[in-house]
Amino acid sequence: MATDRFGRNIHYLRISLTDKCNLRCVYCMPEDIVFRPSTELMQDDEVITLFRLFVDLGFSKFRLTGGEPTIRQNIVGLVRQMCAMPGVNEVSMTTNGVLLGEMAGPLAQAGLKRCNISLDTLDPERFRRITRWGHLQAVWDGIEAAERAGLLPIKLNAVVVRGFNDQQDVIDMAALTLEHHWQMRYIEMMPLGDVAGFQQAQVVTEAELRATIESEFGPLELLNDGRLDGEARLYRIRGARGKLGFISSVTAPFCAACNRARLTADGKLRLCLLREKEVDLLTPLRQGATIEDLKEIIRAGIWTKPWGHGLAQNVVPMNRVMSEIGG
Ligand code: SAM
Ligand code: SF4
């Protein structure tokens, strides 16, 4: 079991399978981003070797992310190998949904449990503006395919950006939960790297979001007595089938209950999303470190996991943008 010096049991790993993406969301990366050469990224056998190490250390919950995980070659094969490993409780994915129309079925058959799909607006023009060139219909087809394939419950993630999708979009997306058993989650935009200035200027807080939604639907009903579901605080519009979730890392950090670590596509153990500190795993793996050596490097790294982020003190991580970590 991997524990940090604050006594937190860390057993949830988010793995970025690529830093590349088929979209260029304004809140995630600069338009002219330069991706890493593929040789610097974990190859399939390296992903599986490191994955097995984390399983041995007691990690049981995994989320595949990116960049866009569905554009990785052999993604279905990787999922199959991961899900077949004893000790693995859940492998899920965060995706932009663009390729899910064709991939949801094969991913579900390979053992993927569910996926979170990013959806920031229901308006095709605003979708294009936020993603810089995406087609909303592809994502919508992806959501329906995920539902058909049984990747449930469907959770939709919206990052709300002032001046892009902060008004009618927020209401339209909340209205999806009236008919669908989906969880519509609103994420406060976090500042990272080169786009931090834009992100800090355009952030929309949970308080504003709830006020916008309540102005249309009336008071929201708090669920779970306010206890977090993962990182989301849950509410329901009166009479709705689905739920609303708010992930408020900026205004209401949930660091005390953090149980997660991240593995970047270039094989670094990232101990906190919003802190620069990382431990290199890929270089020692390529230099022939033994399995026991690598486990010790991971254990020692987890022990030093930072208590939490420093956004309140205006400490912003500058060494990567979001797509290089995976969210
Ligand atoms: N490409 C996939 C996707 O978009 O779902 C997976 C990678 S993406 C980096 C993972 C999640 O991070 C998505 O839900 C995305 O909306 C979210 N995200 C990206 N940039 C963010 C930011 N600056 N603040 C908060 N969430 C962000
Ligand atoms: Fe790509 Fe996801 Fe980042 Fe959008 S949020 S640019 S889809 S990695």
Image (cartoon, grey):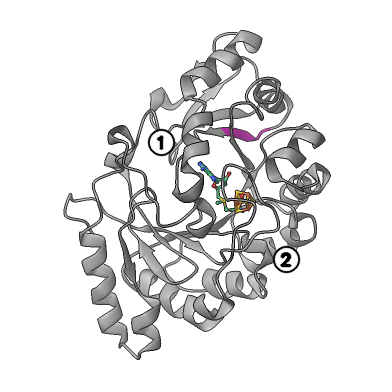
**Does label 1 point to a residue whose CB lies under 8 Å from ligand 1?**
yes
Q: Is residue 95 left or right of residue 137?
A: left
Relative placement, left or right, of 234 versus 163 is left
Amino acid under disc 2: Pro
- Residue 247's place in the image compared with 152, above or below, is above
Identify the magenta region. Answer: 181-185
Query: Badge 1: few (under 14), some or many (20 or more) residues near its Cα, within 10 Å?
Result: many
Whole-percent x, y for residue 284 in the image:
33, 83
Q: Nearer the viewer, residue 79 or 304?
A: 304
**Disc 1/disc 2 C-alpha distance (Å):** 33 Å
Q: Is residue 85 above or below residue 129?
A: below
Looking at the image, residue 128 sits to the left or right of residue 12; the answer is right
Disc number for residue 249: 1
- How far across and how far down the image is residue 189, in percent? 50, 36
Instruction: Identify the residue position indicated by label 2 in the image.
Output: 106
Within 10 Å of the Cα at label 2, are there few (<14), some (14-19), or many (20+) other Cα atoms?
A: some
Q: Amino acid at mark 1?
A: Ser
Please name whichever residue, 72 or 110, is drawn nearer the observer in this view of the structure.
Answer: 72
Residue 27, given in percent of the width and then of the height, sits at 57, 42
Q: Is residue 221 visible?
A: yes
Instruction: Give the quadrant of residue 125.
Output: top right
